[in-house]
Amino acid sequence: MHHAGTGNDHLHGGDHVLPTERISLRQAAMLLVTALTSTGHLLFVRIVAHYAGPDDWISLIAATLAYAALFLAVIRLVSILPGRNLVEISVAVTGPVVGRVLGLVFIWYFLHVGAMLVRHFGDFIRLSMPTTPLSVVIGVTLGLVTYAAKKGIETVARANDIVLPLLLCLGLMASVLLHKDKRYVELLPVLELGWAPVFRGGMALLGLFAEAAVFGMFGSFLSSADRPYHRVLWAVVVIGVLFIGPITGSTAVFGINSVQNMVYPTFEELKRIEVADFVANMDVVGVFLWTLGSFVKASVFLWAAATGLASLANLGDYRPVITPLSLIMGGLAILIGGNGPEVQRFLNVTYPIYGIAVGILLPWLLLALAWIRRPRHASGVSGNLGAGAPHQGEQ
């Protein structure tokens, strides 16, 4: 897959030629913010509260600072092997056999994240439409997501340029309108149970933040004019800031014991807002905007899985594999199960380990191997690795 830099860059594969799309570094960062906050606010506020209690805000600060450093591995990989996505980088660094296995791991991860999102979104929507079959909600959702993914990452990024500001406005409005109901004494005492709960809460958030590894799939679509790519780190800071309100607000409004027993504490916050007749039913607005955010995230992860599979299969166009992958994502969404104890246990215990392993440790492993294989006479690694790593369509 060639770098989307100038003029008439193309993806080459057999007889198929597909003009590449471009997104700016700002758009890539905005996609990360939408992806992590749209579901993070709904699902992970309770999880962090479950572990850290009223110290969940300390877990947030620690996880944000830690991931700002850990995210550098993905940024560095995209920088030293420009014009390649994370799957192609895996092949470049580890060779065709191991690299394809690692590429399949990333593809599965993106599919799995998308399937979890679709399932939890379906469960959330059915709160207001309980008679609607889950399969119908998932089918309609994936139909729209498939359409968006086929339109391409550039189109999704442009749509997100509208969606994210609306989400930010909703969050700001909710924070202001709920201020009178907040009792910040609920956040005290600080560190009553020590650092262990804070650590566990931070690990849960790191499992979520690890999903930002999808940035590695944007490598083929970023303009060289946007280098150095480390400027995308501002997205991690913004994500951390955007979690402060939901995490501290839920505890301050309801108390930590109530938050730990809620499935969607942030949604419960919105249901409390009522200021005269013109500022009511904020939960309806929240459902609408979270729906848009979830569509953006699901589209990005389906697109990422399709782009990765097209790279491994040496295809010139990722679009033909989007529909089959969408069907797999839908099947996974149904098999995953709803908000029962097993699913909650997976989110609380397994997912942080799973996410950190694939989204954080694996990129760092690739970066370490890239450093080991670097030319001894050069400061970078792209020259030595690039020769042995076929781009999409060059094998």
Image (tube, helix red, strand yellow):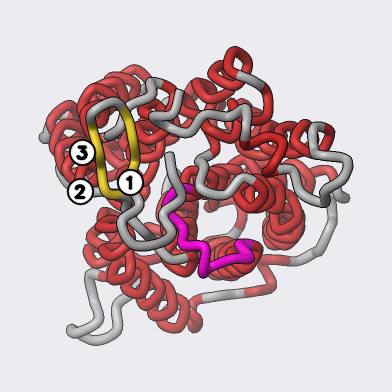
Left/right placement of residue 123 relative to residue 128 reads right
Q: Position of residue 50 (x, y in %)?
A: 63, 43
Mark 3, Cα crowd under 10 Å, few <14 / some 14-19 / many 20+, is many
How far apart are the alpha carbons under marks 3 and 1?
Answer: 23 Å
Residue where numbered disc 1 is placed? 10
Q: Earlier in the sequence, mark 3 or mark 2?
A: 3
Label 2 vs 1, first from the N-terminus: 1
Q: Quadrant of residue 392?
A: top left
Q: Does the image show residue 252?
A: no
Please, what is the three-letter code of the amino acid marked with disc 2? Lys
Of callouts 3 and 1, which one flags the residue occurring earlier in the amino acid sequence? 1
Residue ID for mark 3: 146
Q: Is residue 222 magenta?
A: yes
Main structural element of the magenta stretch: helix, strand or loop?
helix
Tag 2 residue:
151
Magenta stretch encompasses residue 87: no
